[in-house]
Structures are given as C-alpha cells and as structure tokens.
C-alpha cells in the first residue's frame, strides 16, 4: 500500500516537473510584406514565416484570430486576451506589460524619391539636409521613425513641408502625383507597395533608423519559461541559418 502511494507521489512529482505548455495567441493585421492575408485567406509574409519557424522550434502552439483594428488589438494585448505581437520595438512603456524576445530581424526606415527624380537628391544624407534644402516630405501619420525625425518633425510641419498619410498605398499615390519630393517610411513596406502599384521609387543615401525588432509577449499571460524557450529557439535557428534563409528570400539581411 505504501509502495502504491510512493509511486503515485513520484508520478505527481514527474507531472509537476513537466514544463507548462507554451500557448500563444495573436490577431492578424495587414502589414505587407511582413504580415498579411494571402489570396487563399491564409496568413503570409516575412514575419509570419519567421514566427512560424521560431514557435515550432520552441514547441509553442499558436492560435490566430481574425484581423482587428489596431487600437483594439493593442488593448486586448495589454489585457492579456492576446499575448503575442510580431515585429515589436522594445520600449520602456511596453516593458510595463510585456516581455521581449531577442531580436529576430532588423527594421530599416529610409527616405525615397521617384526614380525619375533621384539624381536631384543624391546629396541628401540626413534628415537635416531635407530641412536645409527646403524639400517637401511625406511621412506616416503615426509611429516612431527615429530620434532625428522626431526632433525635426515639428519644424517640417510648421514650415508646411510635411504631409502625412495613413497607408503606404495612399502615401505612394501622393508621391506619384507630385504632392511631395520625398517619402519616408519602413523600407521593406515602401518597396513592396511601390512594386504592387507599379510606381518606381529609389532610396536616398539616408537611413533614418535601423533597429532590432522582437516577438512581444504579454507579461501577465506568459511566463519567463516561455520567453526562454523562444529565445533559445531563435538562437538555434540563427546558428543553423534557418532564419537568415527566410530573410534572404524577402531581400532582407
């Protein structure tokens, strides 16, 4: 009888020693070429492929919900009803309610002109030069695009040289219509949308921001062990060249 109790106790201890299941949930968004809904209604994109490889290696299950408005998606994440977001910047404010993986790729913010006009702007190598040469600029209405742009944005706006857009499709149409000399934004997203619209753009010799991006996990509904599994998976896949091969297919380093 005592032996049976001992075996039961050992079994319970063994169950307790098993790591908890890593179960994550996220909502879709339209951010091509990083994350978007494909014609067959399945998710696709660079970040989607990278996240799929990382979570599979980490042994995490992922539940994907339908697309939500940005504000609602963020609110549900902060509440823990969603607990994974892709392509996140690690900021002090977010660290109050989130934990971050090691970087799995880098984002790049650049400035582009219409290809037919690029010869006029090859001496523009800083955001200050955009201002000094009194050039007009298109930029996203919301988002963080580096300290230099944040510092000069009020002056650009005050001098009437700044126009904003909500989507890259809108911004590129404004550029094509001659509403501004230059357009600023995520380099990959601008190139993707320009190709989709058949608009020829070329980068200036100016990188406004290059920064790491991370998987962001809600702190209340995930554990440090979940993060450790994901970080270990990223490290292994980087070493094996798996993540690099995915990025290369999308033209990313």
Image: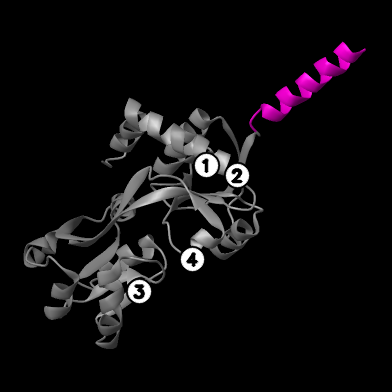
In the displayed structure, does residue 9 sit left or right of residue 149?
right
Q: Could you tell me which residue is drawn at 31 percent across and 34 percent down?
A: 244
| Quadrant housing residue 60 | top right
Q: Nearer the viewer, residue 84 or 27?
A: 84
Total residue callouts: 4
Q: Identify the residue position indicated by label 4 in the image.
A: 93
Q: CA distance from mark 3 to mark 2?
A: 39 Å
Q: Nearer the viewer, residue 11 or 62?
A: 11
Q: Identify the residue position indicated by label 1 in the image.
A: 227
Which quadrant of the figure contains the C terminus? top left
**Circle nearer the N terminus (1, 4):** 4
Q: Position of residue 66 (x, y in %)?
A: 61, 49
Marks 2 & 1, CB-CB < 8 Å contact: yes
Q: Could you tell me which residue is drawn at 13 percent across and 73 percent down?
A: 129
In the displayed structure, does residue 176 sit left or right of residue 43?
left
Q: Is residue 39 visible?
A: no
Q: Identify the residue position indicated by label 2 in the image.
A: 223
Q: Which residues are magenta?
A: 1-19
């Amino acid at each position: 009888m005592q032996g049976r109790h001992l075996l039961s106790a050992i079994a319970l201890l063994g169950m307790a020693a098993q790591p908890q299941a890593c179960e994550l949930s996220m909502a879709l968004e339209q951010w091509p070429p990083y994350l978007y809904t494909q014609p067959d209604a399945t998710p696709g994109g660079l970040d989607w492929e990278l996240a799929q490889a990382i979570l599979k290696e980490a042994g995490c299950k992922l539940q994907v919900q339908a697309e939500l408005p940005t504000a609602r998606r963020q609110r549900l994440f902060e509440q823990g009803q969603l607990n994974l977001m892709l392509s996140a910047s690690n900021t002090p404010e977010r660290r109050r309610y989130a934990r971050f993986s090691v970087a799995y790729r880098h984002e790049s913010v650049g400035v582009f002109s219409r290809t037919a006009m690029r010869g006029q702007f090859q001496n523009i190598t800083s955001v200050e030069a955009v201002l000094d040469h009194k050039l007009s600029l298109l930029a996203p209405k919301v988002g963080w695009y580096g300290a230099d742009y944040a510092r000069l944005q009020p002056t650009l706006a005050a001098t009437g040289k700044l126009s904003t857009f909500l989507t890259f499709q809108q911004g590129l149409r404004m550029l094509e219509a001659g509403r501004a000399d230059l357009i600023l934004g995520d380099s990959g997203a601008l190139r993707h949308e320009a190709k989709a619209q058949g608009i020829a753009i070329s980068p200036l010799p100016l990188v406004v921001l290059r920064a790491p991006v991370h998987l962001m996990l809600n702190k209340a509904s995930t554990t440090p062990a979940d993060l450790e599994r994901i970080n270990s998976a990223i490290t292994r896949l980087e070493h094996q060249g798996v993540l690099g091969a995915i990025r290369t297919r999308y033209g990313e380093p």
